[in-house]
Amino acid sequence: MTTALASSTHGAAEVKSARKARHMGWMFGTAWLVVLSFCALFANQLPFIRTYDAKVRVAGQAKQYGFGPGWTAWLGTDNSSHDVFARCIYGARQTLFIGIGATIIGLTVGGLLGVLGGYYRGWVDRAISIIVDCLLAMPALLLALLLIQRTDQIKETITALGWLTRTEEITITLGILAIAPFARIVRAQTLGLRERDFVLAARSLGAKSQRVIWREIMPNLVPAMVTVAVTGLGILIAAEGTLAFLGLGVARPQTWGTMIDAARDDLSKAWWATIFPCLFLFLTVLSFNFIGDHLARKFDIREAAV
Amino acid sequence: MAGTGKAHLRTEGDVLLRVEDLVVEFPVGRTGLKVNAVSGISLDVLRGETLGVVGESGCGKSTTGRAIMQLPRPTSGSVLFEGRQLTDMSGDDMREARTRMQMIFQDPISSLNPRRKVRDIVTEPLAIWKRGNSTEQRAKVDALLEEVGIDPQRAAESQPHQFSGGQCQRISIARSLVLEPTLIICDEPVSALDVSVQAQVLNLLEDLKAKHGLTLIFIAHDLAVVKNISDRVAVMYLGKICEVAPSDDLYRAPAHHYTSVLLDSIPVPDPSVAATKTAIEGEPPSPVLPPPGCRFHTRCPAATDVCRNEEPKLREIATAHFVACHHPLYGDDVPVSVA
Amino acid sequence: GKKNDSGTIATNATVGATATSAATATTSTPGTVGSASTVANTTPAATTVPAKKPVSGGEITISGEAEVSNAWVPAAMQCDEYCHQRARTFFEPIAQFGVDNKVHPYLAESITPNADATQWTIKVRSGISFTDGTPLNADAMIENLQRTGNYILIAAEVADVAKIDDPSGAKNADGSAKKILKIEKADDMTFTIFTGKDSDPAQPLPWPGFDVVLTSQFGLIASPTWLKAVDGDATKAIQPVGTGPFIVQSYAPHDALVVTRNPKYWRKDADGVQLPYLDKITFKVIEDSKTAEGALRSGDIDMFSDSSGTIISDFQGDPDFPTLLQKDYAESNYFIMDLDKPGPYQDVRVRCALSMAIDRQEIINLTQGGILQVANGLFSPGQQGYLADNGFSTAQNIDAAKALIADYQKDHPGPIQVTYGHTADRINAQRADLIKGYWAAIGVDTTIEVIPQETFITNMLLGADNFFIYDIRLHSGITVDQQNFWWNSRSATQDGKGLALNFARVRDPIVDTNLATARSDPDPAKRQAAAEAVNRQMAKECYQIPYSWTLWGTMHKANIQGLGQATLPDGTVARDGTDFGGWFSTSSLWLDKG
Amino acid sequence: MSIAIQASTRTDDGPLLELEGVRTHFQTPRGVVRAVDGVSLTLERGRALGIVGESGSGKTILSRSIMGLLPTRGTIRQGSIRFEGREIGGLSRRAMRDVWGKEMAMIFQDPMTSLNPLMKIGAQIAEPLRIHLDMSRSDAWATAERLMNDVRIPAAGRRLRQYPHELSGGMRQRIMIAIAMACGPTLLLADEPTTALDVTVQAQILDLLGEQRRDRNMSLLLVTHDLGVVAGHTDDIGVMYGGKLVEMAPTAELFANMKMPYTEALLQSIPKLADPSHTRLNVIAGRPPDLVNPPVGCRFSPRCPYAQDRCREEEPPLIPTVEDPRHTYACWYPVGSPAYHETKARRQREAEVAA
Amino acid sequence: MRYFLQRMLQFAVVFFLVTFGVMIFMRIGMNKPGDPARTMLGGFVTDQKAAAVNKQYHLNDNVFVQYFYWLAKMFRGDFGISVQQNITVANYMKGRVLVTFFLGFYSLLWALIIAVPVAVYQAYRRDSNFDRAGNLFSFLFVSLPALVLAPVIIQLFVIRWAWFPRISEKVMPWQSLSGHFKNFFLPVVVLTLPLAAIFARLLRADIVQTLQSDFITLASAKGVPPSRVLWTHALRNSLFSLLSSVGVQLGALVGGALVVEQYFSMKGMGALLLTSILSKDLFVVQSVTAIVVAVVSVANLLIDLTYAFIDPRIRHARALT
Ligand SMILES: Nc1ncnc2c1ncn2[C@@H]1O[C@H](COP(=O)(O)OP(=O)(O)OP(=O)(O)O)[C@@H](O)[C@H]1O
Ligand SMILES: Nc1ncnc2c1ncn2[C@@H]1O[C@H](COP(=O)(O)OP(=O)(O)OP(=O)(O)O)[C@@H](O)[C@H]1O
Ligand SMILES: [Mg+2]
Ligand SMILES: [Mg+2]
């Protein structure tokens, strides 16, 4: 037989290597987060991590930026003579706590609102949409500022909230910010799911709405929620840093945001004190983005791209 | 056609389901307009019978099926199932009643929850109604799966997407049988399947029907399929019934112009059959603004002024053969009304 | 006469807010007889002797920290350092300090006390008018003094000025007669102010240092015509009118104040050149000192004042940007405790233990550029009552601190928990972080609260729930008399019962008696001894935890001349930074274009 | 391998389209999908060829391979595609652009998604005219209106200015045909043009296609899964299974004398109107082959009731029947062969025993 | 039209709820018996001033009355007065509005100018090196908050190379074009990069999706050249996410401006909001928030209309409703 065409494999190699690149991003993200979480969780036990308050002294004296990156202090020391590496790890603890806490709040409340609105439609949906619209109409940062700034007075007025620490305030605030986007995405997904025949099938089997929501719809929302949560985590962590910059961060234990903000003006003097926390923040956000992107691809959820 | 009337409803025999003047309307946004999806349909099904419903896309077949299940509840009309009026049943009673009737959907993939294991899906009805303990449930489900030709072992560990379309449709069928319903409404169960698989599923339905003493309402747009499985066929057009007859009668001698056009349009896999007769012009009008009089008059070759103004009623033109047409292909024209 | 205990709190301070440190409240009094010799103002060599003659013309940009709310009405300003800096370009005081640490008349031609210093007669300088054309006379000054003297913050400063019922019969909100200062006008250009213990006109109180008050916000004189206009329309407050060397051109809060030369200014320099030299000054707001540093270096601004040791040390020895330092009579940086709060602060052992746990030099090294001096109390060098050794231990002594804590825990078992508050600022946060570390080392658990600036001060004044230990900067000045209301138990109002300017709620009879002596005793030696006694007593009780004394620096481009060279009408060189550290006169500034 | 057939069907001009051993494979994470795996066929001018087969048998990919409209990524193409004697299999997309629309046109399955929703109908019909024939805007639109009249769209002038969503499915499919006709191509590839339409409309569209084809002397490659559709509307039929062409013949010949057990089974599994209701249907057991790991030997062998060992080992070539050289099939034991009858009889006996 | 009215109604509801919410929120703890003005102004105000403020703003009335008075004033174009700064809010914003407007306008514009061609080309050459580089960069910039980006940029361009001023002045283009550029460039860069990255990612994904649709294949099958397929057929059909994202990002831009203004010491609306929130400047917060909400909502409405302009289906659906 005549073979007028040589095999034309145009693009095949590219596809492969692109897939590989994406895979690498995902692998990197997971690896980074696993190592980071491990160090953060066991910071007190791990021998190579100094304690939070330990000072690395130069000739017995605490010194601002006494050490650059090196053997004594891997990532140098900060303006209070603390080990930047150790602080980054403790910062991870704090930052991840805030990020994950906020995501859980946003996901729970937003997810619930979204599911209810999407499932029941009608006035429930309209009411929820208005709440969501209101939350979205306010620029997020503005809302955060208002919330945090007012907590003192709120705590005074609503004494039941007196136990809130700054960390928890910020966590809750960021959680509130996350509600609207989560609710929107979940609602959109629910709207799609409720039209699917298996929901109709469940109802025709006599399942109650509650059961339909929990058994049929929820499990199908999980991929979207996880994906959006992961991507959202990156955004929330960055948001925490921004709040720190505006003076509304958590002072102690320091978050990455606080660390960056504390040292950023000494960049020319001691680049390490800013750059390393920046790097931690950046890599973590990047990791979450990579993983989010991977999940979005895997579950084919396009909303998460935002 | 496109007629109302209840002449075809039977009084004798074991009537399992009797639908009268079923109307379903959907609002179009907030315009105040509405989609007249189903406009006054009456049907009945005897116990053990298979009723086929055919019609073009959008004529309201699925809506009829769902309205019978009260999902959603019809705008008006009555649905009498096993002697009980479903339309004004309370929520909980209705949920209970739904266990006696089940539905199978067109898209086998979409009708199974993609995130659950197949066996759980099939067990779900039993779990909802807490029938039996888990071993009993399991035994029952496994037996059913076996019966529809799915390996229970594989079902226990796989999710729907690991099965082919035909297999998914079998799983749907198994699920609908678990609660031992008397009536199954099949909404185009084979439309999404390849011909070879379609035959498998049709045969399976026939077998199960005989074995479990089921009554079926079989909705499809493929006339050959409907004919194959049904005892009696109702032809729908734009939310109305135009003809009801035992299936062999209907295909041998269609009385309604629409039925005849429909039959003529079907491409026959046999080159020796003369090429299609002239197809009718146009497409079905929008159900938002259905034409007055006979709804088919806009496309009917035999339409007259009567058809444009007056809605024909279903009437018997041969034994058990009912048609809603002023000028049927055989039988008498409707006597021109005096008014 | 009867003691007036109607609840008016004697205040002679303005409490302002700045971003770099917790709170500043400063007053200055000249060294009264006998203490002036200890005072010297430090100016760097670069600016001490101007080799060249000043030239007129040119404009400069000055920056300062965030503003607190401002009305530019002397009777409503919450004036901090940067506020004074700007207000004094268009308002002028009745009197001002010279580098000789004596009060010199400014808008007044003379200020004369009677023999026992219970009546002060002021003669207004003639030939001056406000920039809106209103003439300056006795009526104008009295109008201003009456208004400002009744302003809640200034009222405390003039608490020992006699007050009488308002002759117009005006009433307060609670129905009591409205009080005005007892000021008697002699003629169009002369009037007399009377003192009275606790405002009681029947008990004239000898007050040898009264004239100091006239150099402060109380003495700033604004156009009465404009003041009345503001009464009608509050938004006119952003276009203030005074007699000063500059006229306000535009004001945008939290952004910029632009002032231009007052062409009809009443003063000329020694060579007869019309003052001021500069055509225009733009005052910007740059909240962050580091940004200001960057802006100065990149040429976006020409000068700024700052009290951050880190910033000042950055500029030390930089020939491109000379620095003028003000380090005497400095404020103290310390941790203040609300002694009213139940719990560990009530116990001197805990207070002293907390103090001993701290490594002061380390705090200075890490948060203040290493250039500040370790403080042993609230009396900084130069101030009346300063003692090199007041019995206070400034060295870190963890073991001793632990011992004290252990001792305390014998009586009060259980963990010791303290709450520490600071304003949202990087250096303060860094210090908080360090403090928590120090206190953790002696087994004290610290909760850190970040508190917004306004809340911070309100909390201290009103004694809010979360006011426990604060990082604060206060108490500049020269005499202990100026600190009277800060430490006097009269102003230690209980939490929730009103404003307490005695933030720490110090209620100590020894402190009280000595403060009274320091105000009115005619014998300077006794006043000095009283001051030292206060210092020792507070050190012994560890009422506050001092760690360093403030240092102010004014960094500027090398071509800016005349800084610290301003003269008073009588020819004496004026002393900048009184009332509040850091501010400087602008009338003497000129640009060296060569 | 199909030299004889080609020789006998060649007209003076030579065939319009000749495919030889066309293979189109995709690289996927699962492995190489052999979507089209060695298809050879010839299409004469003016004739209509129907391609039938089950879902996934490679019909769409075959027509796209001819058109050269495959995704570039991960596609491996082999074999020769000659169009009007010219090899077009290896042409770049740039070179193909002159062929597309002008000489070859295509109609897609789903009329709902095949038109650009944001462009006016007129603009979409006019687009190829302006590109290929350099028409002015007004000329192109006038021609577009004429084309719309040709495909019997009422009120064409008004419709020109409408958007696709304002038209029904049948109308849109007519528009698609108008677009395909615009530049007078010689070959029209129609991929399941009526699957998404109602039967009554399907009949209209099929008639329209046939009519246009005859009027313009076009060749038509009609891809469908419905044997009924090809039976009435094509001259020849090719049956595809698992990426291969398993049987090909003139329409009448095929129905009268089918050789492949697959073709037979396919036909038998369709319910027929002529049969009384409740007629038991014949069933093809099993599932279509996985194109990543196709069965060895004949691809139908795992499902074929007549399969022998040879079928499972050796791949049958496409050979002509004795009766009609235009009828080719790929089967070791075709319908009517002794082995076939033997197996059939055995099956029957077994069934009787079981009953 | 009906749709438009409906949107306006929705806007009104949201506007009322948000502004009312903000007011309530600002007054939590202020409306306790006693002296709201004092709580708001700190402990130092005179009785007269406190009384005057209380009276003028009805602070002792219930919140609904307060809200009503405030709203009535807003509608008369009177945004109120900054009680603390003794300046009308309108005056306060004057000179600041333009700063933030230019920041937002330039960032949005540049983000689109960068993102659109990049995304189109990426989608066209999917999985090519260009695409991968584009993806990587967009990932990097999406993951770089201003917190990280601004210090580095300032360090390099301002401190190290001194190309740009440390604090950005409000130089308007009509005052000095080069000065305008110098002062706005860096803040705009900090805002633009992440924005462009977000836009590019969204748009690329959408175009990739669109390129797989039948009508694109049909366009190719008609012989339409790739550039026309991309820019006319694919791009227009892929704008939905991008446009809605522009709407979402508008709100985020206000937040971004707030941060960037802080970094570059620009005195814009963001800085104003920050100071007024921190200093509890009630009416400034309320009015500026109201304005921001209104602007963001109106912009979203415009985006909605734009989409209807692009997509006849939406126009059609809306004509029905
Ligand atoms: N939930 C709904 N809301 C609005 N309109 C609906 C809804 N469901 C169905 N319709 C409309 O009602 C009419 C009948 O729909 P139905 O699904 O019953 O038709 P069908 O005969 O089943 O068609 P097909 O063969 O396409 O399944 C259609 O015009 C459809 O658009
Ligand atoms: N881009 C692709 N990448 C990988 N595999 C593909 C691709 N396109 C098609 N295939 C595979 O090629 C095989 C043939 O597909 P094709 O679309 O030609 O089938 P078909 O006969 O047209 O089916 P249908 O009747 O469902 O349209 C299928 O198995 C399909 O999964
Ligand atoms: Mg249907
Ligand atoms: Mg196909």
Image (cartoon, grey):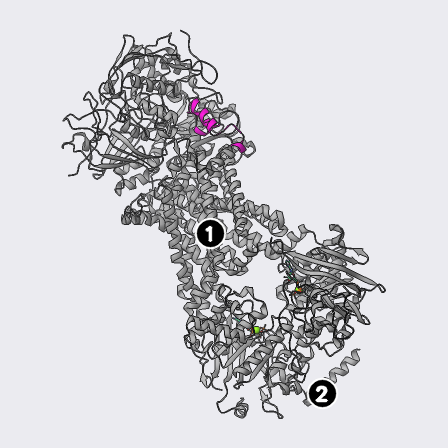
Q: Nearer the viewer, residue E178 or C495?
A: E178
- Is residue A217 in the magenta section? no
Q: Quadrant of the C terminus of chain E?
A: bottom right
Amino acid type at image mark 2:
Glu
Q: Is residue D167 visible?
A: yes
Question: In the rendered structure, the residue with mark 2 lies on which chain?
Answer: D
User: Residue B274 lies in what quarter of the image?
Assistant: bottom right
Give the distance between the C-alpha atoms of the residues marked 1 and 2, in whole angstroms: 77 Å
Whether A118 is drawn above or below E134: the answer is above
For the residue carrying disc 1, how many other residues have a C-alpha within 10 Å: few (<14), some (14-19), or many (20+)?
A: few
Which x, y percent locates residue A292?
50, 55
* SS at mark 2 in the image: helix
Label annotation for residue E302:
1
Quadrant of picture, ligand 4 = bottom right
Amino acid type at image mark 1:
Leu
Q: Nearer the viewer, residue A10 or D141?
A: D141
Which x, y percent locates residue E191?
39, 50
Horizontal relation, residue E156 to residue B179: left or right:
left
Q: Is residue A234 visible?
A: no
Q: To which residue does mark 2 refer?
A: D342
Whether C576 is drawn above or below B296: the answer is above
Q: Nearer the viewer, residue C49 or E37?
A: E37
Horizontal relation, residue D132 to residue C297: left or right:
right
- Is residue E51 in the magenta section? yes
Horizontal relation, residue E174 to residue D292: left or right:
left
Residue span colored magenta: E36-65
* Residue in the image at 34% along x and 24% along y: C227
Q: Nearer the viewer, residue C399 or A178?
A: A178
* Residue in the image at 44% along x and 25% along y: E52
The answer to whether the residue bearing label 1 lies less than 8 angstroms from the nearest atom of ligand 1 is: no
* Residue with the most extreme front position: B339
Which x, y percent locates residue A172?
52, 41
